[in-house]
């Protein structure tokens, strides 16, 4: 309980710091937000009225205090452009972005975990070299370039095989599951391949380190084969490190899928954020960035708790996972 309270305090402090960073970063951007929203033909009176409506005529501490009070009451603001609440817009777009992240992470794990373990199990130096090359090449492929290649190969209409749609999301949404899933296949593969290469490298390093440990030697001395000892003992001992890697991979995908969403014209969080930034919708962008930052911190908090629960050394030592990792 003491550990949870400490981590929760750090989470709240980091969230407060990030909120201040987001607020200041948007305020130092060049240009007048009210003038951009009002348009080039707006009168000075109209711009001044819009500045007052947005609260931009107040001091920065007053604006920040008002924003924090609204957040504490669950009010993330209303978009100046669309007139809709930020929460309703984010909730609508999460239904596309979150399944895309989950599918991408599943593909990354299916690729990375078995290949990482296989790279440790094999004694063939040529196969080890092949695994090394595959990890480097797959990890070096940008998701944008990989997505374009997948469109040329597998998209309907212009692709070589024409298996999956390459643009948009069905108007029916998830009421038509087959169409919705098929529209996410290519973007999830584009993101999952690159992430899978990272998972593969970390798995090979973590399991490889544990494969030379005394626990594995003792398991083999008790009658296990090398393969059994690695899969049953080394992999289990490496699980806390792999959980941390999977959590970080999931967090990185939150930003990675935004590029892919724009490439495949998916109306997810990435497309919404890009549109709001282009429209200089300060209220929406401010709250959206805060929610993304909160998601990153929440993932780190969850991984920290999972790491401590899985690693008995942390419980006995009474220290956090970051200290052991260091």
Image (cartoon, helix red, strand yellow):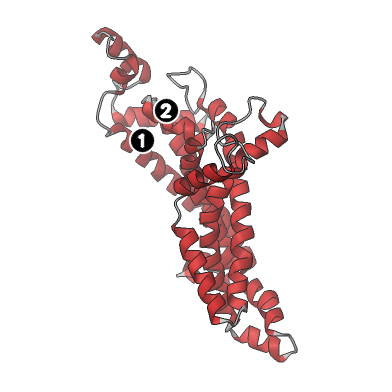
Compared across the picture, whether 162 is left or right of 130 comes to right
| Mark 1 Cα-neighbour bin, 10 Å: few <14, some 14–19, many ≥20 | many
Query: Which residue occupies 54% across, 34% down?
Result: 268
**Residue matched to label 2:** 276
Instruction: Say which quarter of the image contains residue 65.
Output: top left
Q: Quadrant of the N terminus?
A: bottom right
Picture layout, residue 306 above or below residue 218: above
User: Who comes first in sequence, dot 1 or dot 2?
Assistant: 1
Q: In which quarter of the image is the C terminus?
A: bottom left
3D distance between C-alphas at marks 1 and 2? 16 Å
Kindly state the secondary structure of the residue where label 1 is placed: helix
Query: Farthest front residue?
Result: 160
Query: Which residue occupies 70% across, 75% down?
Result: 232
The reply to whether residue 316 is visible in this rendering is no
The reply to whether residue 273 is visible in this rendering is yes
Picture layout, residue 272 above or below residue 245: above
Query: Which residue occupies 44% across, 28% down?
Result: 284
* 229 and 25: which is toward the camera: 229
Picture layout, residue 215 above or below residue 30: below
Location of residue 308 in the rendering, given as x and y in whole percent from the top left corner: 59, 64
Picture layout, residue 29 above or below residue 238: above
Query: Which residue occupies 35% across, 21% down?
Result: 55
Question: Mark 1, mark 2: which one is toward the viewer?
Answer: 2
| Mark 2 Cα-neighbour bin, 10 Å: few <14, some 14–19, many ≥20 | many
**Residue matched to label 1:** 23
């Amino acid at each position: 309980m003491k550990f949870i309270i400490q981590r929760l305090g750090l989470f709240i402090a980091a969230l407060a710091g990030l909120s201040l960073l987001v607020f200041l970063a948007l305020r130092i951007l060049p240009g007048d937000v009210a003038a951009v929203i009002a348009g080039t033909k707006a009168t000075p009176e109209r711009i001044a009225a819009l500045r007052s409506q947005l609260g931009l005529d107040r001091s920065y501490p007053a604006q920040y205090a008002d924003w924090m009070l609204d957040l504490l009451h669950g009010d993330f603001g209303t978009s100046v452009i669309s007139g809709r609440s930020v929460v309703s817009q984010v909730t609508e777009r999460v239904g596309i972005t979150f399944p895309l992240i989950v599918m991408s992470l599943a593909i990354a794990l299916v690729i990375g975990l078995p290949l990482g373990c296989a790279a440790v199990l094999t004694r063939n130096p040529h196969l080890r070299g092949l695994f090394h090359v595959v990890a480097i090449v797959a990890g070096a492929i940008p998701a944008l370039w990989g997505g374009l290649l997948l469109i040329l190969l597998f998209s309907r209409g212009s692709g070589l095989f024409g298996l999956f749609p390459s643009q948009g999301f069905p108007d029916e949404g998830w009421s038509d599951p087959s169409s919705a899933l098929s529209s996410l296949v290519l973007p999830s593969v584009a993101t999952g391949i690159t992430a899978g290469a990272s998972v593969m490298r970390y798995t090979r390093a973590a399991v490889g380190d544990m494969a030379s440990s005394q626990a594995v030697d003792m398991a083999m001395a008790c009658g296990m084969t090398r393969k059994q000892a690695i899969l049953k003992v080394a992999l289990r001992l490496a699980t806390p490190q792999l959980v941390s890697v999977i959590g970080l991979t999931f967090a990185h995908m939150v930003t990675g899928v935004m590029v892919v969403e724009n490439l495949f014209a998916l109306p997810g969080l990435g497309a919404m954020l890009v549109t709001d930034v282009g429209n200089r919708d300060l209220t929406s962008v401010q709250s959206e960035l805060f929610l993304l930052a909160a998601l990153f911190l929440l993932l780190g908090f969850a991984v920290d708790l999972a790491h401590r629960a899985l690693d008995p050394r942390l419980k006995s030592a009474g220290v956090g996972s970051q200290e052991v990792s260091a």
